[in-house]
Image (spheres, rainbow, N blue to C red):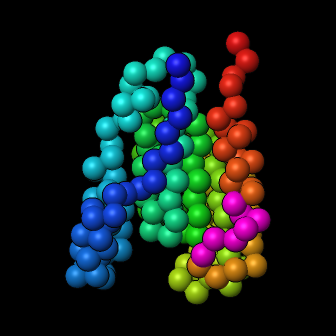
């Protein structure tokens, strides 16, 4: 019996605490990302219990996007995919030395609103460019929206999940 898990990072109460910590220390924006990374560094149980292809997908939106990218690309075991919505890649300069070989080929779905006032499009594009320069497989999508979710984006996410979670031919 196979299981599929999408990790929506993080539990709401923990995220509120960490967002508050960032508010108290505005000069250190990666703090939230680093604290979340420490908490999720252990491989998911479904990954530890399984010897077949990966079926865990990390998904995050806004700061959750930063956490999903930071943790997913450093994760010690293979993930099926990473969904990075309306966010950015934190600490991109450190990724080449910290990246996990297990996730060098993990598909990354990145989506962003062209009118996003919270995380400007240029920052997301710079994150995409940095990942592509490191040879990550990035599927890039933009939508006519601000910092939210677009109906077409939901369809594209569905297609991405179907492709990364499809049963592997033996």
Which residue: 42% across, 29% down? 46
Q: Nearer the viewer, residue 164 or 101?
A: 164
Q: 155 above or below 3?
A: below
Relative to 64, 126 lies left or right: right
Q: Position of residue 30 (x, y in %)?
A: 36, 68
Residue at left offset 42%, top offset 49%: 71
Would you say residue 70 is visible in this rendering? no
Q: Nearer the viewer, residue 22 or 104?
A: 22
Where's residue 14, x and y in %? 27, 62
Q: Is residue 22 left or right of residue 162?
A: left
Q: Quadrant of residue 126?
A: bottom right
Q: Is residue 116 magenta?
A: no
Q: Residue furthest front?
A: 1
Compared to residue 129, the image places residue 28 above or below, namely below
Q: Is residue 63 visible?
A: yes
Of 153 and 115, nearer the camera is: 153
Q: Position of residue 88 (x, y in %)?
A: 54, 67
How many marks the image carries: the answer is: 0
Give how far across and how far down residue 26 sits, in percent.
Answer: 30, 82
In the image, 13: left or right of 110?
A: left
The magenta stretch is 148-154
Residue at left 70%, top 12%? 170
Q: Quadrant of residue 33?
A: bottom left
């Amino acid at each position: 019996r196979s299981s599929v898990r999408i990790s929506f990072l993080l539990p709401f109460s923990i995220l509120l605490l960490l967002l508050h910590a960032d508010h108290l220390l505005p000069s250190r924006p990666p703090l939230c990302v680093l604290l979340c990374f420490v908490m999720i560094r252990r491989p998911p149980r479904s990954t530890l219990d399984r010897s077949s292809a990966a079926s865990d997908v990390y998904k995050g939106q806004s700061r959750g996007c930063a956490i999903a990218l930071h943790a997913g690309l450093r994760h010690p075991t293979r993930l099926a995919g990473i969904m990075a919505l309306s966010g950015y890649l934190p600490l991109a300069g450190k990724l080449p030395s910290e990246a996990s070989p297990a996730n060098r080929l993990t598909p990354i779905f990145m989506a962003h609103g062209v009118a996003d006032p919270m995380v400007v499009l240029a920052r997301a594009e710079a994150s995409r460019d940095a990942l592509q320069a490191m040879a990550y497989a990035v599927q890039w999508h933009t939508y006519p929206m601000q910092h939210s979710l677009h109906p077409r984006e939901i369809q594209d996410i569905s297609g991405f999940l179907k492709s990364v979670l499809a049963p592997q031919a033996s």
